[in-house]
Image: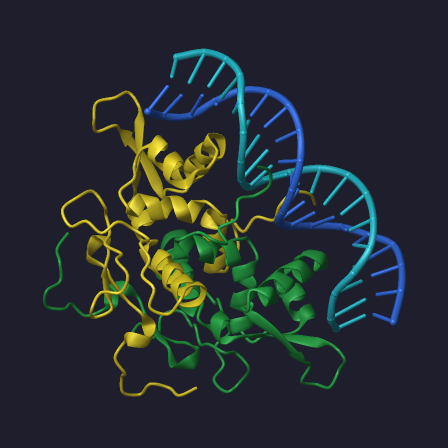
Chain colours: A green, B yellow, C blue, D cyan
Amino acid sequence: MVGRTTFESAECPVARSLDAIGDSWSLLIVRDAFDGLRRFGEFQKSLGMAKNILAARLRNLVAHGILETVPASDGSVYLEYALTPKGRALFPVIVGLRQWGEDHFFEPREAHSMLVDTDGGRPLARLQPRAADGRIVGPDDTVVRKVADLPARAGRRKR
Amino acid sequence: MVGRTTFESAECPVARSLDAIGDSWSLLIVRDAFDGLRRFGEFQKSLGMAKNILAARLRNLVAHGILETVPASDGSVYLEYALTPKGRALFPVIVGLRQWGEDHFFEPREAHSMLVDTDGGRPLARLQPRAADGRIVGPDDTVVRKVADLPARAGRRKR
DNA sequence: CCGTATCCATTCCGATACTG
DNA sequence: CAGTATCGGAATGGATACGG
């Protein structure tokens, strides 16, 4: 057999997920989509990637139902790319990657702007670095907390 | 400029994370490491990948401090690969990918064995599909819950 | 059993030019 | 502005042979 192995029919859900978004760019595009970016040029400018591969990645994300194309809101003839519910469900993955990177690639209390923090604007998620109570508010009323911050529970198993 | 873009010095922690583990295989190796696999041959057999690229990915994971080599526990001359604290900190990311894949690539209530569920054995994590209370127990006493299951809190912001 | 080395095909990615 | 077309270099990945 030649060519890359596909995990399309793998039994493991992690493998299936990585098959859809396991390349260098897809999750960064999704991250930007959470940040409110919708237009081809916005993604291209934000990520600095070649237009042909951006087009290819967008096609793949649309094919996987993570993004969908919608008519441009400003009446232009072009398309916009919006997160679907399936795409928005990637929020915890993005947060996990962000927190892991923050904890292991940066200085302890350094602040990083992964996503813009505007209250009434376009961003779909608020991902400011560490709110006072450690809470991060995402789309669809999801809330993510760092696992270590979760309250202890009776019956928890010691390793 | 030629060659692939690197995110080694990106400001965004998500980009930095993806630079370390954003390929098809690394997270699957980490997943298997959580499952208790330690030997070269175990990974190779489990993932079915070519030995040369397994060696390359293991080298990369060790270089990033996600795995570390330790002398084989059985006295053989070979090395074993064990998760470091930094590697174990990837647990929430794996869980996020697993839950997303389970929710969007499989039938609603289907059960999937991502990781072996043994109680006293070698696995470092217990990742059985959906415990009764939705709780998943990981290494280092971490606990992960599906974000939607988190209790509502006063002052939560409606989108 | 544990890797390394080699060969090869495929894919990825970047730069640029081009079209509507 | 939003893509498509094309090209070339680089990395990825698979099969297999080889050596410790």
Q: Nearer the viewer, residue A52 or B105?
A: B105
Give the number of callouts: 0
Residue under the image location 67 percent in, 64 percent down: A44
Q: Is C6 rendered above or below residue A84?
A: above
Residue under the image location 24 percent in, 56 percent down: B138
Residue under the image location 52 percent in, 61 percent down: A27
Horizontal placement of C16 versus B83: left or right? right
Query: Whole-percent x and y of residue A98?
Result: 42, 61
Q: Nearer the viewer, residue A142 or B28?
A: B28
Horizontal placement of A53 versus B65: left or right? right
Q: Is A68 rendered above or below residue B12?
A: below
Q: Nearer the viewer, residue B146 or A39?
A: B146
Res A108 seen here = no
Q: Quadrant of residue D8?
A: top right
Query: Whole-percent x and y of residue A95?
Result: 41, 65
Horizontal placement of A71 versus B23: left or right? right
Query: Whole-percent x and y of residue A138?
Result: 41, 76
Res A4 seen here = yes
Residue under the image location 25 percent in, 58 percent down: B128
The quarter of the image holding the N terminus of chain A is top right
Query: Whole-percent x and y of residue C1?
Result: 33, 24
